[in-house]
Amino acid sequence: MRAVVAARTGGDDPLANLEVGDVDEAVLRPGWAMVHFAAGSINHHDIWTLRGVSATPIVPPHVLGCDLAGSLFGYADDEVADDLPKPSSRVVVHGVVRCGHCVACRGEEAAPCRSARLFSETPVAGTFSDQVLVPAQNLIALPDSVRFDVAACLPTAYLTAYHMLFTRAALRPGMNVLVHGVSGGVASAAILLANLFGITVYATSRDEEKRALALELGATEAFAPARETARALIERTDGMGVDAVVETVGEPTWELSLRSVRAGGIVLVAGATGGLNPPAQLNRIFYRNVTVAGSSMGTLTELRHLVELCAPGRLKPLIGSTYPMELAEEGFREVLRGTARGKVVLI
Ligand SMILES: NC(=O)c1ccc[n+]([C@@H]2O[C@H](COP(=O)([O-])OP(=O)(O)OC[C@H]3O[C@@H](n4cnc5c(N)ncnc54)[C@H](OP(=O)(O)O)[C@@H]3O)[C@@H](O)[C@H]2O)c1
Ligand SMILES: [Zn+2]
């Protein structure tokens, strides 16, 4: 079957490690299901994998891809729970693969699985292949009104944004949030979702066109990620600073995040595309009672809610471009260069 793979990792050019080629057919095993690929969106995670930056080293060639929407072919097991989608259903797949046997998976501890993996993280194959094996419990039925390309945006970027805003930061209507890096998948999702739920959004981008895009997506105001922007944000928020910051850029925006957040506010960190190691500036954190919260992906229930928001068209994920899987390199180039307007989807 055809697949988008990391044929190598490391080096200076991640795209030189990307290939579209033939890989062995997937073989079903108990507890798992097989899905025919219809669409999957590219995430910066796929670029990290090509760079050789991953929690667990991969052994190339390894199939890339965290997100999947498609048609359910069937299950390994003859009998499955009644609430699981029936074969031939349209489905979207929750991207967190649980180990199934740690204390959290056994239900003895209310915490995430201790050794959860995303699709494409060893030993789990990624989703960019004609057929994809997925844990049966990760399947969510997709209403006919939600297109495959739309659903393919939800499992990583939109779920991460949703979990940050509403679970980690518990933002409510009337509050405000600062989002950096407007056109990134998580950032554009955060702007759309916060706006949908009555949260005032301020955004930053290095690029003037992307700042205009932020306003189109519902942000109240967009700024350059410059030092003076903190003062402007404090003015806009009655001298307080913002309730929360969605930080996925890292080094280039970290100081601005800490300067802009209000005393007692929260800086949510889900990524560091621009660099991992900014000066911590601990004084800005403890003196003003700021919470710095890591955030990773989200739950199956949260993904279901996102599907429910898309079904009547309340949430319309921003898709910048769509490519057939064979032209994956074009899509990866957009994500690498940061030129995409929102998500880049493979079909
Ligand atoms: N924790 C999780 O579960 C999770 C889930 C999804 C993503 N992530 C991580 O979150 C990050 C964002 O991922 P993504 O796929 O949404 O988007 P992305 O492709 O990483 O782009 C994010 C945005 O960052 C800005 N940016 C990039 N490099 C920059 C630099 N050097 N200086 C300033 N800004 C820069 C760009 O915005 P402008 O050009 O507008 O400034 C870009 O649009 C990644 O690091 C990814 O690994 C984590
Ligand atoms: Zn587990």
Image: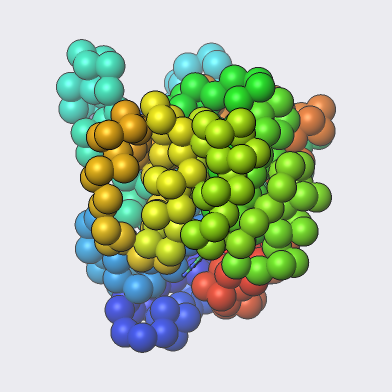
Name the residue nearer the viewer: 305 or 88.
Answer: 305
Name the residue nearer the viewer: 288 or 16.
Answer: 288
- Residue ID at (39%, 26%): 264
Residue 68 percent across, percent down from the top left: 56, 48
Judge from the rendering whether residue 198 lies leftward or rightward of residue 186; answer left or right: right
The answer to whether residue 157 is visible is no
Residue 184 percent across, percent down from the top left: 58, 57
Name the residue nearer the viewer: 288 or 275.
Answer: 288
Q: How many numbered circles does the render carry? A: 0
Identify the image's colour scheme: rainbow, by chain, secondary structure or one colour.
rainbow
- Residue ID at (26%, 52%): 280
Q: Write down which quadrant ligand 2 falls in.
A: top left
Work out which residue is located at the far left of the displayed protein and give it: 103
Quadrant of residue 54 within the rendered picture: bottom left
From what the image shows, is residue 303 above or below residue 65? above
The answer to whether residue 272 is visible is yes
- Residue ID at (25%, 34%): 286
Quadrant of residue 126 within the rendered picture: bottom left
From what the image shows, is residue 8 above or below residue 189? below
Judge from the rendering whether residue 10 lies leftward or rightward of residue 130; answer left or right: left
Residue 10 percent across, percent down from the top left: 30, 79
- Residue ID at (20%, 13%): 108
Residue 123 percent across, percent down from the top left: 27, 53
Question: In the picture, which quadrant includes the C terminus?
Answer: bottom right
From what the image shows, is residue 147 above or below residue 51? above
Name the residue nearer the viewer: 328 or 215.
Answer: 215
Judge from the rendering whether residue 26 lies leftward or rightward of residue 223; answer left or right: left
